Image (cartoon, grey):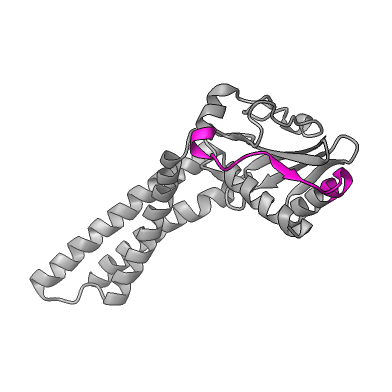
């Protein structure tokens, strides 16, 4: 009986872990839709809490009866599995609440770079290709004041080439590189859920300098959990590394 109870609580914690660990990859593989994936997260949290509550009851019962019901190793396994199942979704929720509910980030908020070759790829995307407007821009200014237009002295052709190289170094799927218009377009697929976010880099002449603007936009989701701003920062760092500046 004691072994059965121990196995049961470990099994419940394992189910909680699997609900969280597999929901995102299953969505990425197209096995389940996004809604079902989020349901998996929710029930993973509930199941993890249930496993911890059962563990506490078993420990209390063990103290009262002075009988060996669950070992330290088994208890640690339950805490680990349940802890991960609870922590991952709650961390995502906390991150979502700490960033604005926007999914279109640009270094130029007045005249954001426009997608060209990527437009057909977003035909069925829930989020339209058009920029979200001033409401989104106002939230971005407050949340990400560091996301601004860049200035370089390198020739336009060199910057286009460097931008494409930086995008490839980051593992993005190249869609368009046009030295004449100064546009580089690419798609980045997130590791866990497999969300596709699109990026356009625009390079323009301004006197003896070149101005570079980057825009990153999610295809789905009201909030990007800060991913697009993070992506732009990562690209700027990689671009400067390629240019050696």
User: In the rendered structure, which segment of residues is drawn in magenta?
Assistant: 141-161
Locate residue 202 relative to residue 8 in the image: left or right.
Answer: right
Quadrant for the C terminus, please: bottom right
Q: Is residue 120 visible?
A: yes
Task: Please state the horizontal and vertical placement of residue 137, each as a whole percent of the image.
Answer: 57, 28
Depth check: 105 or 74 in front? 105
Residue drawn at the location 44% of the way across and 45% of the way down: 95
In the visual, does 101 lie left or right of 234? left
Residue at the front extreme of this rendering: 208
Vertical placement of 209 versus 82: above or below?
A: above
- Please say whether residue 101 is one of the residues in the magenta stretch: no
Residue 57, located in which quarter of the rendered image?
Answer: bottom left
Q: Is residue 144 magenta?
A: yes
Q: Is residue 219 left or right of residue 67?
A: right
Residue 112 x, y percent position in the rendering:
69, 30
Residue at x 89%, y 41% (from the top left corner): 179
Residue 63 locus on image (x, y percent): 12, 71
Please state the horizontal and vertical placement of residue 43, each as a whole percent of the image.
39, 46
33, 240: nearer the viewer: 240
Relative height, residue 101 to residue 88 (above, below): above
Identify which residue, 176 or 193, lies in the foreground.
Answer: 176
């Amino acid at each position: 009986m004691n072994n059965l109870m121990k196995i049961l609580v470990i099994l419940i914690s394992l189910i909680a872990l699997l609900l969280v660990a597999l929901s995102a990859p299953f969505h990425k593989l197209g096995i389940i839709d996004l809604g079902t994936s989020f349901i998996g997260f929710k029930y993973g949290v509930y199941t993890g809490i249930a496993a911890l509550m059962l563990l506490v009851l078993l420990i209390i019962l063990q103290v009262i009866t002075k009988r060996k019901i669950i070992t330290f190793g088994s208890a640690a396994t339950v805490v680990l599995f349940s802890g991960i199942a609870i922590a991952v979704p709650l961390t995502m929720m906390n991150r979502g609440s700490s960033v604005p509910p926007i999914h279109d980030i640009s270094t130029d908020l007045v005249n954001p770079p426009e997608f060209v070759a990527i437009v057909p790829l977003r035909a069925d995307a829930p989020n339209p290709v058009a920029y979200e407007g001033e409401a989104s821009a106002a939230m971005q200014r407050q949340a990400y004041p560091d996301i601004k237009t860049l200035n370089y002295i390198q020739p336009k052709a060199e910057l286009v080439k460097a931008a494409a190289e930086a995008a490839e170094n980051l593992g993005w799927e190249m869609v368009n590189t046009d030295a004449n218009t100064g546009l580089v377009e690419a798609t980045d697929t997130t590791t866990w859920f497999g969300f596709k976010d699109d990026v356009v880099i625009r390079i323009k002449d301004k006197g003896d300098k070149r101005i570079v603007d980057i825009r990153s936009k999610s295809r789905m989701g009201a909030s990007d959990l800060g991913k697009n701003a993070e992506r732009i920062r990562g690209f700027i760092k990689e671009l400067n590394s390629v240019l050696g500046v």
